Amino acid sequence: MGAAKQALRATASQAPGVSMADNGLDRALPAQQAAAGRKVLPIVEGAVLITALILPLVLQDYLTVFATRVIILALFALSFDLVWGYAGIMSFGQALFFGSAGYGVALMARDLKITSIFLVLPAGTLIGLATSLLLGGFLLLGRHPSSVIFVALGTLTGSYAADRLARGWYYLGGQNGIPSIPSMSLGSYDITEGPVYYYFALGILVVVYLLCRFLVRSQFGLALAGLRENEQRIAFFGYKAQHLKAIVFAAGGTIAGLAGSLYAFHEGFVWPNMVGVVISTQVVLYVLFGGSGTLIGAVIGAVIIEGVSFWLSDNYRDIWPILLGVLLLLVILFRPLGLISFVLGERERVGSFGVTRKEKRNAAP
Amino acid sequence: MPLLEATGIVKVFGKLTALDGAALTVGENEFHGLIGPNGSGKSTLMKCVAGAEMPTQGKVSFVNRDITLLSPTERARAGMSLKFQITSVLPTLTLYDNILLALQAQSSLFDLVFSRTRGVLHDQVMRMLSQFRLADHAHDAAAALSHGQQQWLEIAMALAAKPRLLLLDEPTGGMSLEERRVTGELLQPIKQHCSLVIVEHDLDFIRDICDRLTVIDQGRVLASGTVAEIQANKSVQEIYLRRA
């Protein structure tokens, strides 16, 4: 049985491009092929998780600090992937929620001396939720369905305006931002950068990842699949397409807010770029590079782009941005579905949403 | 009281008057054909009924309710369903998921997030698939289907939510003769619970399955009545002769 399964997997992975046509010829295989093919994603997810768990044990301290930053950026990438990769909303201003939350918790720590983890993280998350609800409500819930361009420009403008506001407002520290934010505290213990912060951030990333995974594989995830493929069609089924979009947009904003607050305390300062176009663009690149529409793709994209930039800037001090740009272009040109598409077929990426085998067993007495 | 009543529908696109006081009345469990020469405005009339276009003037009422200005979502929730002229099944999803997507459209957000309805809907999905002879392909991507099969899938999706009225815009477009015959057979059983409006060029197909016909010409109703009445109608014969 094991050998047969492996053989099936081999045939499925050898010819991902023609599998659709093949399905027309052989009726017995598709279900099994799908079942066999579905195995790739959990393997990738498991491998990434194990790597992430052992990383601080083998890295030097300053690299663990860098890795923590990457973990937090991966969390931020998830928020954009949910919004763009799953709901098809082109949010070019995702940093608005990331940065607003960062500034929010920085002000709490500076002016109110509140650093308790139980207060600052929920507050940052709420700031992300509130700003994304406001902007999302305005951009997505109009009388008529809003176009992709309208939403892209609207979010971009929001992010740009916030950047200018932060630069010009003395209370927010102007160009310099807010430096030396005190550490986040848990009781009398300060969570400072290093392995503790790393594992804490990783824990949050895993929990949020699992929540997103649950969401995108649910019937709600099926509705999102319909939404990103043909919004008008599903409105004619009776879906409130714009509401669905606003909900996902707000969920993305919430996650971005959580990531922003973690980032602010980890770096110890916030600065205008954090709400602006630079970080907004960076997160788009993470997701396109890794593979939008898969959660693990967003994580891998963040890790690889950050890792490669780090390495390049160390070794090719003068020309590294050019090298990075060329690499990004190559991937986007030749692998529009991102790096993940090297191992993941189209069918598995989209997934299926019917009853699981377990549910079927429970239903049939 | 008829199920659907559209009266005095005017639709102007810039300088072009596509509809000039057209009307359409459909009773319960009635198969109603909407015919007319190319450019007569029948597709536009269908769109005004479905909510894809808003009429410039006129009134559409459905199940005793004025729906003229309701959005497509609200019309769907009131029991109206539409199959587009261009097939718009979701190609990357499996057939199973295409049907489930249509069936779960009115589930609450809570039920969707916690996947509470898919267990209940499983049997309905399989029933729809086998009714439209697609059960063998349940787990294939919809893109792998033939054109005719995609049309059937689309009709199955439009019927999934048990509408009171189904609007079909050229359901047999691009189909072979055999596929047309099967489409007719597939549509017969739904008469027990659903009315139908069909826009169609294939007059033989229309004659076989419809109870009543409305003929549109130049944005106005030329004639409306049973199939026999329309066939005997002089002015209808004239336009079809003139254009043929």
Image (cartoon, coloured by chain):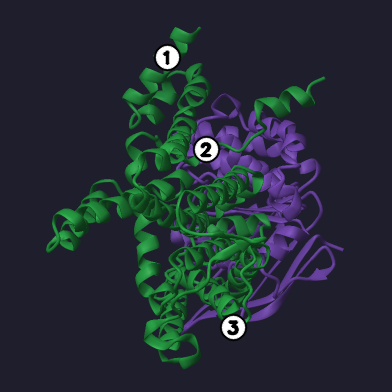
Chain colours: A green, B purple
Q: Distance between the residues labelled 2 and 1?
A: 20 Å
Comparing B239 with A207, the one in front is A207
Residue A6 - label: 1
Q: How far apart are marks 1 and 3 (CA)?
A: 61 Å
Residue B46 visible in the shown view: no
Vertical side of B182 occupied by A98: above or below: below
The numbered mark, 1 or 3, whose residue comes first in the sequence reads: 1
The numbered mark, 2 or 1, whose residue comes first in the sequence reads: 1
Which residue carries the number 2 mark? A351
Comparing A277 with A343, the one in front is A277
Residue B206, percent across and down?
Answer: 61, 47
In contact (CB < 8 Å): disc 1 and disc 3: no
Label 2: element kind: loop
Exactly how many numbered labels are in the figure?
3
Residue A111 - label: 3
Vertical side of A31 occupied by B151: above or below: below
Chain for disc number 2: A
Going by the numbered disc 3, the residue's amino acid type is Asp
Chain for disc number 3: A
Vertical side of A84 occupied by B155: above or below: above
User: Quarter of the image containing the N terminus of chain B?
Assistant: bottom right
Q: Looking at the image, which residue is at 36% across and 38% down?
A: A58
Residue B74, percent across and down?
Answer: 72, 65
User: Quarter of the image containing the C terminus of chain B?
Assistant: bottom left
